[in-house]
Image: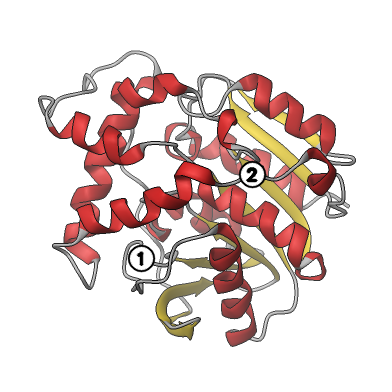
Amino acid sequence: MLRSIAAVVVAFAALPAAAVPAAAQDRWMTIPDPAPMPEPASTGMAPVNGIEMYYATYGAGDPVLLIHGGLGYADIWGAQVADLMADHLVIVADSRGHGRSTRTEEPFGYDLMASDYVALLDYLNIDTVDLVGWSDGGIIGIDIALTHPERLNRLFAHAANITTDGVDPAVETDAVFGAYIERMAEVYASVSPTPDQFDAFVEQISHMWATQPNWTDAEVATITTPTAIVLGDHDEAITRSHTDHMAAVIPGAEEIILPGVSHFAMLQAPDEYTAAVRAFIDRE
């Protein structure tokens, strides 16, 4: 997602901890805590592609897979899980190296991470899903739409990009994004099986962010999955022009601009975010 997130981490480590005012008036300037995760129906560690991948499932019904963004973890989706599990089988997981999942020395790549999630669906005996992906999760969703379209019913790709120049360089000094990085470093230290290796993890995944994604317009024009391209109107990381371009080149894509939120829309406006997800994936 980011071209030089390692530099962002270093830069924000040198700043005072209170990077975002606690009483900020505009919700796009805040990163609220995720809602608590409900009690899962099942949870475990799936052996996929040489790693142990944390997963949890909730509820019953048509399956929906929620994929978090870079440096994040499954519990970002607490509010969405609580709503969707009423009539969906909701699957969440920690991507390789993130949260409670392990990693190897194999270079990170979106193809590999997409393969991890396809293997997880195989492990859970789930054939097809609606996929809601945020940031890196949206990019993984696009990768699955390109490589395994038979596994997807619909794709809700929020704050994704298809080339590295879709990233706004200003994100490198953005206080809200810096606060997110600090928060995720704390989460990593508390839940990861390698709690002292956050810097090594960031360095490893940064090699992917430096060059990926790099799909051509011709490649994404082959997507057949019904797709929503989604962005908050105050997103710090992905440019509106790139989002507009994605919606134009992916056949039949619907562009959704979420008002009054940033890259972290699912936390800043959870009810509105979930309503947008439902309006797309529950459509007849």
Q: Does residue 141 sit above or below 2 in this rendering?
A: below
> What amino acid is at disc 2?
Asn
Kindly report which numbered mark, 1 or 2, lies closer to the viewer in this rendering. Answer: 2
**Of residues 246 and 254, which is closer to you in this image?**
246
Residue 163: quadrant of the picture: top right
- Type of colouring: secondary structure
Residue 34 lies, in percent from the top left, at 36, 46
Count the marks: how many?
Answer: 2
Q: From what the image shows, is residue 190 above or below residue 40?
A: above
Residue matched to label 1? 97
How far apart are the two marked residues, 1 and 2, measured between alpha carbons?
22 Å
User: Height in image: 275 above or below 59?
Assistant: above
The amino acid marked with disc number 1 is: Gly
Which residue lies at the image location 53% right of the left edge and 57% below the top edge? 67
Q: Is residue 19 left or right of 144 when viewed as pictured? A: left
Assess disc 1: are there few (<14), some (14-19) or many (≥20) residues with their C-alpha within 10 Å of its C-alpha.
many
Q: x and y percent of residue 91 in the render?
A: 55, 68
**282 left or right, relative to 37:** right
Residue where numbered disc 2 is placed: 214
Find numbered disc 1 in the image and state the secondary structure of the residue it sits on. Answer: loop
- In depth, the one of 261 and 123 nearer the eye is 123
Q: Position of residue 110 (x, y in %)?
A: 56, 58
Q: Disc 2 on helix, strand or loop?
A: loop
- Residue at x 58% of width, y 23% of height: 239
Left or right of residue 4, residue 245 in this image = right
